[in-house]
Amino acid sequence: MKLTAAKIAEIVNGKVEGNSAVEVSQVAKIEDAKADNLCFISNKKYIHYLQTTEAGIVLVGDNINPIPEGKTVIRCSHPYVAFCQILIQFFDYKNPQQGIHSTATIEPSASIGKNCHIGPHTYIGENVTIGDNTRIFANCSIYEDTKIGANTLIYSNVSIYYQSQIGDNCIIHSGTAIGSDGFGHAPMPDGTYIKIPQIGNVVIGNNVEIGSNSSIDRANMGSTIIGDGCRIDNLVQIAHGVVIGQNTVLAGQVAIAGSTTIGDNCVIAGQVGIVGHISIANNTQIGAQSGVNHTIKEEGGKFTDSPHLPMGNALKSRVLYRNLPEMEKRIRELESKLKTENKSENG
């Protein structure tokens, strides 16, 4: 696939500066790019690469200046987004598998849409509904009464438990479990536990991506809900009855305890732990390895540390932490000095 600068500019609604007839056939990082590569710069920290890169075309924003003589660039409002558009349309991997494999098991009551792919040794249970153009790869298990929308991609070794609902245009990566039992166990008088039946389900909206080896538990009653547009990384645990709003991002190893509600457009960094039965307001940002132990009511806040603190307070506290050894030393010196002075005064 060869693309001219003029064609790329048309696709991303940009403007060519340089030779509009230059062609590229691959994409690359700007520091590694060759003459037939397309790359991008969106951060001024990387502007020095414009002097040395061999890239045929570079996508840049209006803030990137000056442009070295002889370079061909395309100016656009969001270079990284534009680069992603080109990747998706022309360079993204397109899995060639089609049709239903002879080793797949599909119950007679299941409904499979048009142009679907069902991979080797995959099981489709009773009354499952799968929308058009959805692809389910090898060794997946889709249990009874589950509904999966159109144009959804489910990679190998995914387990989707009964009565789950998954929307259109979703991606679920390998090893993920959707609808596993919530962690419900009631203590008995003799010190043992009785399992609390988890009779709810999981509802996942449209345009959601879930990374590999994540687990989203079914609700005790009602639904665990993942809103439209969410992005969930690898190794994320979402417990029973959690509700996550639209376009919220969860990075790797986030763990959310049961019955917590997280708002729209939140960003939760890696290894954050969130206790159960609280709520987090829209547009909240939480730094990596934080522990959230109570409700966050104000929208748009930034928090970090464990237990979580507003970002500004946490940064001030870290300065104090670093200075504690020196402060202790000074306190001990002052105490010693006071003792010496008191002895002198008391003769």
Image (tube, rainbow, N blue to C red):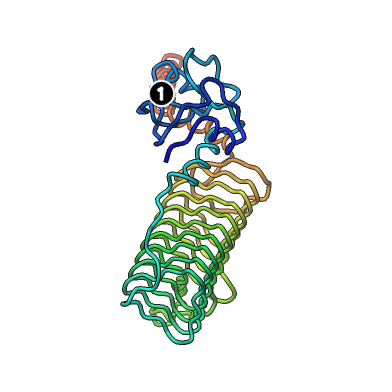
Left or right of 326, for residue 63: right
Left or right of 266, for residue 24: left
Q: Nearer the viewer, residue 220 or 150?
A: 150
Q: Is residue 219 above or below residue 346?
A: below
Q: Please state the total of marks drawn on the protein image.
A: 1
Q: Residue furthest right?
A: 298
Q: Nearer the viewer, residue 222 or 311?
A: 222
Q: Residue at x 53, y 69 (%)?
A: 132
Is disc 1 surrounded by few (<14), some (14 to 19) or many (20+) residues within 10 Å? few
Q: Residue at x 55, y 38 (%)?
A: 81
Q: Nearer the viewer, residue 164 or 197?
A: 164
Q: Residue furthest bottom?
A: 108
Q: Is residue 202 visible?
A: no
Q: Which residue is mark 1?
A: 326
Q: Is residue 257 visible?
A: yes
| Numbered disc 1: secondary structure | helix
**Quarter of the rendering containing residue 66:** top right
Where the N terminus falls, by quadrant?
Answer: top left
Q: Is residue 16 above or below residue 215?
A: above
Q: Residue at x 50, y 61 (%)?
A: 257
Q: Residue at x 58, y 61 (%)?
A: 206
Q: Nearer the viewer, residue 305 or 180?
A: 180
How far across and down, in percent of the image, does residue 195 sit? Answer: 44, 80
How far across and down, in percent of the image, does residue 207 sit? Answer: 56, 57
Where the C terminus falls, by quadrant?
Answer: top left
How far across and down, in percent of the image, does residue 232 sit? Answer: 48, 54
Q: Is residue 241 above or below residue 129?
A: above
**Quarter of the rendering containing residue 39:** top left
| Amino acid, disc 1 | Glu
